[in-house]
Image (tube, rainbow, N blue to C red):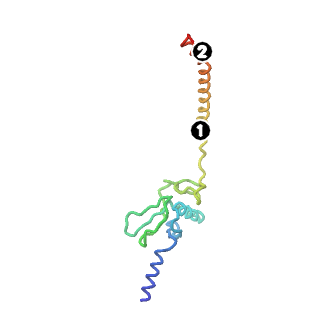
């Protein structure tokens, strides 16, 4: 009788844990996160630990999987981690289809969706500079056209009184 009571207390306490457990498929370890953690933060933290451990198979996102259920529930980068119950397990997903959806960071691959820093403000990737010769050429052309339009408008306004006299000589 006491054993049944202890089992129900353990199950009851497991349902209301202040954290969620996510199985990292790449390392096989379980990572714990507080309830309501953003998925982007969790994946960044998992990938950071994987990179420091020398593992090159990084997580792309997190999904909830239920035994016997064909379709898992995928979490977007800005969604919060939630527990769907005792039958559902949270786990990372590893993209093994080459570089599909990946951004290169040095020799490592990082998913595009999670290419921000852990705090979400500093990108961890070195982006290619948007300034190119074509970009500079377009800006110079725009400035040149601006001066041409200004010169034409100035000439028109300077010659406007003569044009009015030509149209209506009685003035």
Looking at the rendered structure, the number of numbered marks drawn on it comes to: 2
Q: Is residue 7 above or below residue 115?
A: below
Helix, strand or loop for disc 2: helix
Quadrant (top left/top right/bottom left/bottom right) for the C terminus: top right
Classify 10 Å Cα crowding around label 2: few (below 14), some (14-19), many (20 and above). Answer: few
Q: Is residue 32 above or below residue 164?
A: below
Residue shown at 52% from the left, 54% from the top? 112
In the rendering, at what x and y percent does residue 90 appear?
A: 47, 67
Q: Which residue in the structure is indicated by mark 1?
A: 135
Q: Nearer the viewer, mark 2 or mark 1?
A: 2
Q: Is residue 28 above or below residue 123?
A: below
- Mark 2 vs mark 1, CA separation in Å: 42 Å
As drawn, the label of residue 106 is: none
The mark nearer the N terminus, 2 or 1, is: 1
* Nearer to me, 30 or 18: 18
Question: Residue lying furthest bottom in this view?
Answer: 1
State the image quarter where residue 133 is shown. Answer: top right
Q: Is residue 93 above or below residue 4?
A: above
Classify 10 Å Cα crowding around label 1: few (below 14), some (14-19), many (20 and above). Answer: few
In the rendering, at what x and y percent does residue 40 appear?
A: 53, 60
- Do labels 2 and 1 touch, CB within 8 Å? no
Quadrant (top left/top right/bottom left/bottom right) for the N terminus: bottom left
Helix, strand or loop for disc 1: helix
Q: Which residue in the structure is indicated by mark 2?
A: 162
In the rendering, at what x and y percent does residue 150 appear?
A: 61, 27
Residue shown at 58% from the left, 62% from the top? 48
Residue shown at 48% from the left, 74% from the top? 16
């Amino acid at each position: 009788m006491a054993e049944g009571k202890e089992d129900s207390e353990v199950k009851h306490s497991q349902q209301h844990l202040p954290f969620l457990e996510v199985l990292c498929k790449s390392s096989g370890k379980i990572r714990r996160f507080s309830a309501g953690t953003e998925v982007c933060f969790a994946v960044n933290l998992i990938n950071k630990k994987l990179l420091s451990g020398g593992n090159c198979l990084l997580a792309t996102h997190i999904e909830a999987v239920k035994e016997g259920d064909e379709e898992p529930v995928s979490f977007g980068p800005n969604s919060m981690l939630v527990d769907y119950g005792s039958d559902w397990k949270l786990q990372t997903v590893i993209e093994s289809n080459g570089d599909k959806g990946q951004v290169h960071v040095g020799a490592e691959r990082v998913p595009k969706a999670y290419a921000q820093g852990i705090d979400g403000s500093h990108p961890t990737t070195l982006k290619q500079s948007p300034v190119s010769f074509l970009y500079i050429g377009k800006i110079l052309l725009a400035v040149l056209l601006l001066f041409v339009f200004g010169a034409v408008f100035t000439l028109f306004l300077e010659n406007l009184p003569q044009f009015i006299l030509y149209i209506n000589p009685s003035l």
